[in-house]
Image (cartoon, rainbow, N blue to C red):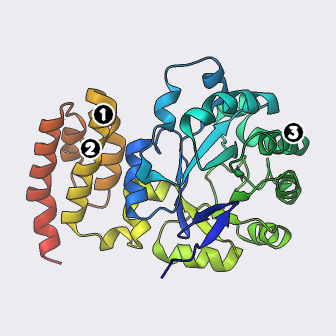
């Protein structure tokens, strides 16, 4: 029996209702691959700065690297002008061959905002519409967008932007339930996303505050969305994609996944992978009652085998004994 897709993004079938949100400096090839294996329905790259592509900057190719098992792959682009998106995509898309092209309209970092990109584009619905018209007119891949509710409480133009995206050929819309001014503060709001879903015919994905298994269904019910995206919570709990809350994950599984992720990082980045892995290791271990000294000891290790050994010693001394008593 052929499995029925959960929803479609243009011609691309999507199987599943939980997706790893794109995060700068986080959703690289190793982490995307891990989360895809555990059940994320789509692999979305870190944003690719269109200026980096046009200037042939050496850092950008690693940001869109992927393996065949990661598909469907969504290539996220960040820029501020329609012609910028088009020029960068004409160079990049034939090389990467993504299934989906995503337009970043939600990044709230200061550097991005200062150049008029990311969430700053929420102030310019007409520019957003032109970006989508240009992109949908030049590429066969479905073009999607990721937005916020607006710039601030005085500019909640999510409905105007959402409709402009659909009318300009957009195939899916992900919505973070906060404004740019809120960043990640306060509570994400689902009623505006329900309004968007009611107004559109394309799929709508909710993003923000997806921390537990219960949140997935709860947010779907409140927003009426087709799927949800989890970002920051997945950094320490990629097992969320297997519908496991962090406290439900056995220590042995955590240990094995840490080593799998570490080895993937070293394979991808070389020796610097150990250093880059520290932010993930800290998140993986945050569930456990480790002393500050123990954690700092692990985070100071800079060679692969020594870190593997150190992680094993910490699990044997402090984690496995405690879990066996539960």
Q: Earlier in the sequence, mark 1 or mark 2?
A: 2
Image side of residue 304 versus residue 208, left or right: left
Q: Which residue is mark 3?
A: 127
Q: Are marks 1 and 2 in contact (CB under 8 Å)?
A: yes
- Residue 184 appears anywhere in the view: yes
Q: Where's residue 180, x and y in %?
A: 72, 47
Q: Where's residue 251, x and y in %?
A: 21, 65
Q: Which residue is mark 2?
A: 262
Q: Where's residue 150, x and y in %?
A: 79, 51
Q: Residues within 10 Å of mark 2 (few under 14, many from 20)?
A: many
Label 3 to label 2: alpha-carbon separation: 41 Å
Image quadrant where residue 124 sits: top right
Mark 2 lies on a secondary structure that is helix
Image quadrant where residue 319 sits: bottom left
Image side of residue 218 versus residue 292, left or right: right
Which of the labelled discs sits on residue 195, or is there none? none
How many marks overall?
Answer: 3
Image quadrant where residue 216 sits: bottom right
Q: Residue furthest front?
A: 1
Q: Earlier in the sequence, mark 3 or mark 2?
A: 3
Q: Are marks 3 and 2 in contact (CB under 8 Å)?
A: no
Q: Where's residue 310, x and y in %?
A: 13, 44
Q: Which residue is mark 1?
A: 273
Q: Residues within 10 Å of mark 3 (few under 14, many from 20)?
A: some
């Amino acid at each position: 029996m052929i499995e029925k897709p959960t929803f479609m993004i243009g011609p691309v079938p999507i199987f599943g209702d939980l997706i790893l949100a794109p995060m700068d400096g986080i959703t690289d090839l190793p982490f995307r691959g891990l989360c895809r294996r555990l059940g994320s329905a789509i692999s979305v790259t870190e944003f690719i700065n269109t200026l980096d592509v046009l200037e042939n900057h050496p850092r950008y190719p690693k940001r869109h690297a992927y393996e065949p098992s990661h598909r469907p792959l969504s290539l996220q682009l960040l820029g501020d002008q329609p012609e910028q998106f088009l020029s960068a995509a004409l160079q990049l898309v034939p090389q990467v061959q993504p299934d989906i092209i995503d337009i970043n309209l939600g990044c709230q970092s200061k550097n991005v905002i200062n150049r008029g990109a990311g969430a700053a584009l929420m102030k310019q619905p007409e520019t957003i519409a032109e970006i989508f018209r240009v992109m949908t007119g030049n590429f066969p891949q479905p073009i999607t967008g990721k937005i916020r509710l607006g710039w601030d409480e005085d500019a909640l133009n999510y409905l105007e932007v959402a409709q402009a995206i659909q009318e300009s050929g957009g195939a899916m819309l992900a919505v973070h339930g906060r404004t740019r001014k809120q960043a990640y503060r306060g509570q994400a709001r689902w009623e505006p996303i329900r309004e968007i879903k009611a107004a559109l015919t394309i799929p709508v994905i909710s993003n923000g505050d997806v921390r537990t298994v219960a949140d997935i269904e709860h947010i779907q019910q409140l927003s009426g969305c087709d799927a949800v995206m989890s970002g920051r919570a997945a950094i320490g709990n990629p097992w969320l994609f297997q519908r496991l809350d962090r406290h439900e994950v056995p220590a042995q599984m955590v240990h094995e996944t840490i080593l799998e992720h570490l080895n993937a990082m070293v394979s991808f980045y070389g020796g610097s992978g150990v250093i880059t892995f520290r932010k993930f290791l800290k998140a993986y271990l945050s569930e456990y009652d480790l002393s500050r000294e123990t954690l700092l000891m692990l985070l100071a290790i800079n060679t692969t085998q020594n870190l593997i050994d150190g992680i094993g010693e910490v699990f044997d001394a402090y984690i496995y004994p405690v879990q066996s008593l539960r």
